[in-house]
Image (cartoon, grey):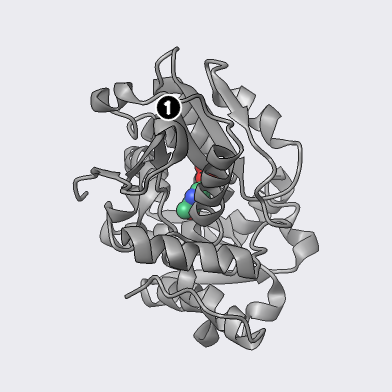
């Protein structure tokens, strides 16, 4: 793992508010950010259980699928990805995430959206065992107890100076880890990348404190949805700071934090830590979609 560092964001904000970003995206070129944290103890457990195959689930541009494929190869596991959407079967070459996963040895099983919904049911898992033999199951998005244990290592002693810690939320695993290792006087703010009210309950399962809040106004229409304003924000933020953000998670979170600063959400002199959870592998796939829609592309990968 590469060393993670806190980068001060050299932009002047009102009320002497300061932003710092924890560059978890630099942990590893392919297994970046929180997906590395979430897999760490799961892979140790898989080894301890003598499993030689990892099986997991994900969508077409999933950071988690890319991470499992790469980490699996590095640590000598076979990997199987159950992918949502059977129309993708003959589109692997056009999809940078699936292509990357396949090049790293992942085998795919494409399932319809209806079937994909059954993914946590025993009967579905049993069928997969019949087909593929024994495996270590990594849940969709990688969230389980061991993943949260890994995410509890994101914050370190030097982060005790921050008043707010902000992160993007998908399944809620990462924020749960941050909450558990935060100090009682710190506030953890989660920015869901998708619509829906179920996250609150998910986080309560794993989080051991209640110094947190979800801010649900910055999903931009739902998971994977983006608009011109967000693209321009990410490109400008990169020009000003040289920090690349991804369009699915971190871009929406940082947009939200800066918008809230403008709305006086934070008290004067607040020190805010943004968690860069990675996800930059998704930019190429997003740019293909943006070109098809004749929208400007993300210019953050140079
Ligand atoms: C998966 C992911 C998240 C969401 O993490 P959860 O633990 O599922 O909430 C946030 N940011 C990035 C870049 C991710 O890939």
Is residue 294 placed above or below 210 in the rendered structure? below
Pick out the residue farthest to the top: 184
Residue 135 seen in render: no
State the residue in front, 217 or 208. 217
Does mark 1 have its CB less than 8 Å from ligand 1? no
Left or right placement of residue 289 versus residue 79 in this view? right
Q: Is residue 145 above or below residue 301?
A: above
Residue farthest toward the left in the current orientation of the protein: 3
Q: Residues within 10 Å of mark 1 (few under 14, many from 20)?
A: some
Residue 41 in the image: state x and y as whole percent.
36, 37
- Residue at image position (41%, 33%) is 17
Left or right of 261 on screen, residue 118: right
Nearer to us in this view, 294 or 51? 294
Q: Percent from the top left, x then y, of residue 25?
A: 34, 54
Asked whether residue 30 appears in the rendered view, the answer is yes
Residue that label 1 marks: 270
- Name the residue nearer the viewer: 153 or 277: 277
Residue at 55 percent across and 82 percent down: it is 288
x 57%, y 16%: residue? 210
In the rendered image, residue 294, in percent from the top left (x then y), is placed at 64, 87
Q: How many marks?
A: 1
The relative height of residue 54 versus residue 188 in the rendered view (above or below) is below
Residue at 70% over, 28% down? 201
State the SS at label 1. Answer: loop
Tell me the quarter of the image containing the C terminus.
bottom left
């Amino acid at each position: 793992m590469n060393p993670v560092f806190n980068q001060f964001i050299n932009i002047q904000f009102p009320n002497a508010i300061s932003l710092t970003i924890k560059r978890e995206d630099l942990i590893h070129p392919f297994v970046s950010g929180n997906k590395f944290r979430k897999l760490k103890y799961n892979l140790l457990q898989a080894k301890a259980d003598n499993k030689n195959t990892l099986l997991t689930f994900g969508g077409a541009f999933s950071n988690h699928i890319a991470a499992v494929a790469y980490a699996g190869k590095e640590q000598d596991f076979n990997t199987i990805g159950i992918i949502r959407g059977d129309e993708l079967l003959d589109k692997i070459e056009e999809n940078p995430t699936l292509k990357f996963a396949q090049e790293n040895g992942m085998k795919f099983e494409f399932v319809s959206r209806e079937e994909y919904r059954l993914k946590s049911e025993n009967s579905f898992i049993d069928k997969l065992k019949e087909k593929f033999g024994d495996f270590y199951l990594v849940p969709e998005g990688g969230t389980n107890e061991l993943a949260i244990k890994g995410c509890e290592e994101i914050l370190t002693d030097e982060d005790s100076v921050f008043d707010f810690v902000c992160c993007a939320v998908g399944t809620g695993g990462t924020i749960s880890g941050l909450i558990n290792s935060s100090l009682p006087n710190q506030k953890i703010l989660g920015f869901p990348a998708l619509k829906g009210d179920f996250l609150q309950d998910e986080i309560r399962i794993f989080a051991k404190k209640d110094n947190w809040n979800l801010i649900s106004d910055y999903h931009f229409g739902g998971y994977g949805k983006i608009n011109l304003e967000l693209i321009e924000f990410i490109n400008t933020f990169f020009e000003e700071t040289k920090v690349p953000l991804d369009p699915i998670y971190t871009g929406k979170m940082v947009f939200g934090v800066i918008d809230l600063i403008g709305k006086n959400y934070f008290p004067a002199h607040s020190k805010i830590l943004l968690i860069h959870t990675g996800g930059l592998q998704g930019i190429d796939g997003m740019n293909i979609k943006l070109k098809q829609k004749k929208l400007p592309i993300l210019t953050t990968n140079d």
